[in-house]
Amino acid sequence: MAFSSVIRRRLWPRLSSPWRSLHEGPDTIDELLDRHLVKKSPNDNDELASQRRLTSTRREVLSLYRDVLRASRFFAWPDARGVPWREVLRDNARREFEEARFERDPEVVARLLIGGRDAVQKALDKLVEGSKKRVEAEEQQLRDGGGR
């Protein structure tokens, strides 16, 4: 008796019942994928979108924080206590960012980002206005002093 005939008679009935034959496989690629890939639940798409939104928001927040630090460089004069405004602004920015660190509501985060951007822009605009006024005042003094 040949080896292959022994296998067919003795082992094949045992092997064929728990496993499907290769010829009984899926008819289409979609059936193959449905059978072998893990199906995503509807919540997976929501989680992915939420993750992307958080990553995007995180980038925006870090960008705002860096802009605050960059803008604070221009505030070199001391306050009433003798502390440079640069340090006061940086400390306050750090404190406010830490307070809002665990905020997860997208509307609140968006409102904070918009408010922060607005505050930085207003501070820089006032700084530019003040610098222009000082330069004009100095030019006026030079003109008045030079004309005597």
Image (cartoon, rainbow, N blue to C red):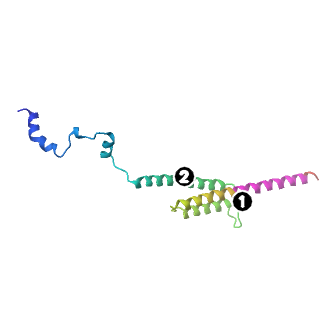
At 87% across and 52% down in the image, what residue appears?
142
In the current view of this chain or complex, which residue is farthest to the top? 2
| Residue 43: % across, % down | 41, 55
How crowded pointer 2 is (Cα within 10 Å; few <14, some 14-19, many 20+) is rated as few
Specify whether 41 is left or right of 116.
left
Q: Which mark is residue 13?
A: none
Disc 2 marks a residue whose amino acid type is: Arg
Q: Nearer the viewer, residue 35 or 148?
A: 35
- Nearer to the camera, 101 or 40: 40
Q: In the figure, is residue 29 to the left or right of 90?
A: left
Task: Find residue 82 and report its horizontal and vertical position in percent.
Answer: 70, 65
Asked which secondary structure carries label 2, the reply is helix
- Identify the residue at image location x=89%, y=51%: 143
Q: Which residue is mark 2?
A: 59
Tell me which numbered mark, 2 or 1, is placed earlier along the sequence: 2
Mark 1 and mark 2 in contact (Cβ < 8 Å)? no
Name of the residue lying farthest toward the right: 148
